[in-house]
Image (cartoon, grey):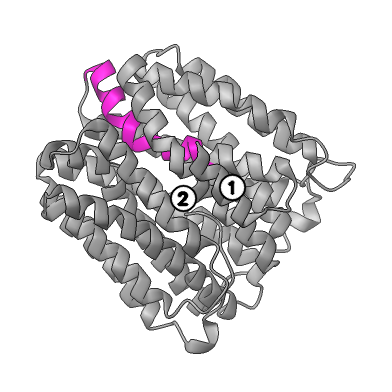
Amino acid sequence: MQVPVALLRVVRPQEHPGLLLGTAYATAVLSVGPFLLPAVADEYDIGLGLASLSTALLLGGFAVGSFGAGRFLRTRGRVLGLAVFAALLTNAASALLPPFVLLLGLRALTGVAVGVITWYSWSQVFGASERMSEIAVVGPLVGLTTAPVAAALRDAFGPEGIYLALAATAIVPLVFSRRSGVLEPEYFAPRAERSSRHAPTQAARRVLICLGLLTLGGSAVFTYGAVIAADRTTLSSQAIAWSFSANAVASVPSARWTGRRGRAGFWLLGCATAAVAIGVVGLSAVFVAAIAFWGFAFWMGVPGAYAVLSSASVHPEERAGDAQAIMAAGRVVGPLVGGLVLDQASAPVLGVVGGGVMALAGLGLLTLDRPSADSSATSAPG
């Protein structure tokens, strides 16, 4: 428990606690997938491919929530509070382990609520580099403890233990959500604001496609990282969980980085290499090193990709929401693809397929990335 506290002292956040805690909660909900999937598959006696629908619908709801919120909602504090309360209710209902079809609906609704929470936090700080870096670093800090806690809860109580923990922890951001937004009298944006958006440029579309490919290939492998490690390495359940924490530790300095990052495409190629190593090599030391490097490379590369997107856009403030939505969409498809490949083929095949898709993203971005686009700007989590 002392590691996250010490790191928070280094970061010294200045943002409203409601924004930071809301981001932390959303990150936790999205981060427990690698430990929930095998537990859900065992509980309902189904394959990983079918169980992955729970994660896919969660992320699908996230895409809908984050994309739609920017078009229909205003950043009032009560909007954040209502979204957190909705997530509390849906996670509590999920803990009852209803019929699988109903569970899928609850995970989709949870995703919508989490998407609104994430949109809310990022929309408050977009365009201010220092403020964005404070929101960005929350994800890696939360990841330090999310994986081992989720693994322990799964081992002790099954999936219902994780769902109950997610419901209980929602109380904290709910309490701090007041006064976290602007003082707008309305919850919903006027119709004129909803219809005044501009289409992305051709170059911006290409960057968005690269970001979608990155999360598609990455989530196909990362979501099943715990399953792959348990099957192909000698790591214990807790050791695997702490490996995911190492991913978060490595992400902290790169998420908070304020200097030059280099060309983003090369960092994405580094993520692709890590994905291939996780699936193909099958050695404990390689798994730990690869998943840790993946965290560092991801948070070095994605902010650079956002800088390229900004420089390629006439209206960059509109593209931030598009990027968040398309990356969420990639995470919807990725677990489905990964589950099917793992069920029908093998972990090495999954590593090659997922890493290959990520490599396409890196190579595509290299064709667009220019030295002038390199920036210290920090992006929303992907």
Question: Which residue carries the number 1 mark?
Answer: 66
Magenta residues? Answer: 27-45
Q: Is residue 229 left or right of residue 246?
A: left
Proximity of marks 1 and 2: CB atoms separated by less than 8 Å:
yes
Residue 16 lies within the magenta run:
no
Q: Which amino acid lies under the numbered mark 1 shown in the image of this protein?
A: Ser
Marks 1 and 2, how far apart at CA: 9 Å
Residue 62 visible somewhere in the drawing = no
Measured as percent of width and height from the top left, residue 188 is found at: 78, 43
Question: Which residue carries the number 2 mark?
Answer: 328
Residue 31 lies within the magenta run:
yes
Q: Is residue 284 left or right of residue 213?
A: left
Residue 331 visible somewhere in the drawing = yes
Q: Residue at x 55, y 51 (%)?
A: 7
Q: Residue at x 51, y 61 (%)?
A: 255
Q: Which amino acid lies under the numbered mark 2 shown in the image of this protein?
A: Ala
